[in-house]
Amino acid sequence: MVRTRNNGCVEPLAVRGETCGTGLQPVFSPVENRSHNRLTDFATDCRAPRKSFTAARMTILRRRSLESFFEKGYTPLMKFALTRDISPAINQCELTHLDRAPIDLARAREQHDAYCGLLSELAWTVIRLPTSIDLPDSVFVEDTAVVTNEVAILTKPGAASRLAELPPVLDVLANFCEMEFVLPPATLDGGDVLTVGKNVWVGVGDRTNQQGFESLRNYLQPHGYTVRSAQTKGCLHLKTAVNRAASDCLIVNPNWIDPRIFSEWKVIEIDPSEPFAANVLWLGEVTLVSKSYPKSRDRLESHGVLCRTIDMSELAKAEGGLTCCSILFDA
Ligand code: GLY
């Protein structure tokens, strides 16, 4: 996110949570890795289409030294992951396409801690918002905001039980970003928004309505984004069905979304025995894949995608996945 108050520098008080009163628990990443990781992010952003992720990254890194990066005026931004802890009421979460199965809270929290820990290890500065018993789904923080390099949009979740999740997310993001708002009757879940460069697809369905799609399009089009709606069938969110898996490719469950709408991209299909496997989290350097989907991971790796596996089996029972648990942005 480029519009920070301090010319690209982080406002330390916001990170510590001293100004926003939300009880933030920051987990700081190793400082020495940040420039490197920002550089590799930049490298992947400048990828040549259809090159493998690693090849593209290495080509760019050979071409650009750290010095030329700074000479060209790029600011070494920090990478932030906004997360939210798991509510003690997670067993009362919303469910749309799954039958309720008991969620082991302690195990779910261990898995979520590991998720935050892995992001931190990968040089993301992890902000952990506290939760409460009133917010069963708050761990799925992705649904509350859409953050791009130019603007951040506070959403309007389509499940009424989730509206109370918004204020602390706004408190945090407003320290970093210019904020815009989705207003009723529009509804929009961040899990329905897939951004690939300047292309945005919005799933219109259970949680996001046509007005929500139009609202997001109105905010993003002036910044050069092409915003299209996409139809899913049989799954909760667009990002249950499709996600970016590397700089040059997407992973898709073809039973839940028609892969032909992504014809400009290399598309890898999930293994049919693992329908939820498309919810991977692309982090620029590596892609997180749930431990429950080894066959789909094999498919990604056979296409040159660097993967890290993480166990998210408890939160999967709450109809959530890897993308749902964070909002990623630069500042
Ligand atoms: N349980 C995730 C959601 O329904 O939003």
Image (cartoon, rainbow, N blue to C red):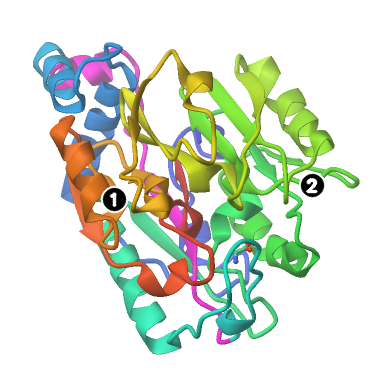
Amino acid at the residue labelled 1:
Leu
Disc 1 or 2, which lies upstream in sequence?
2
Relative to 173, residue 261 above or below: above
Looking at the rendering, the quadrant in which ligand 1 lies is bottom right
Measured as percent of width and height from the top left, residue 124 is found at: 32, 51
Amino acid at the residue labelled 2:
Thr
Report the Cα–Cα distance between label 1 and label 2: 28 Å
Relative depth, front residue between 315 and 271:
271
In this view of the protein, can residue 7 be seen by the observer?
Answer: yes
Quadrant placement of the C terminus: top left
Relative to 219, residue 135 above or below: below
Please tell me which residue is depicted at 32% across the width and 64% down the height of the picture.
115
Disc 2 secondary structure class: loop
Measured as percent of width and height from the top left, residue 187 is found at: 79, 47
Disc 2: which residue: 187
Measured as percent of width and height from the top left, residue 320 is found at: 50, 62
Please tell me which residue is depicted at 31% across the width and 61% down the height of the picture.
28
Relative depth, front residue between 33 and 259:
259
Instruction: Report whether 64 appears left or right of 98.
Output: left
Span shown in magenta: 64-88
Q: Would you identify the image quadrant in which residue 243 lies? A: top left
Please tell me which residue is depicted at 22% across the width and 30% down the height of the picture.
40
Measured as percent of width and height from the top left, residue 211 is found at: 84, 35
Disc 1: which residue: 288
In magenta stretch: residue 81: yes
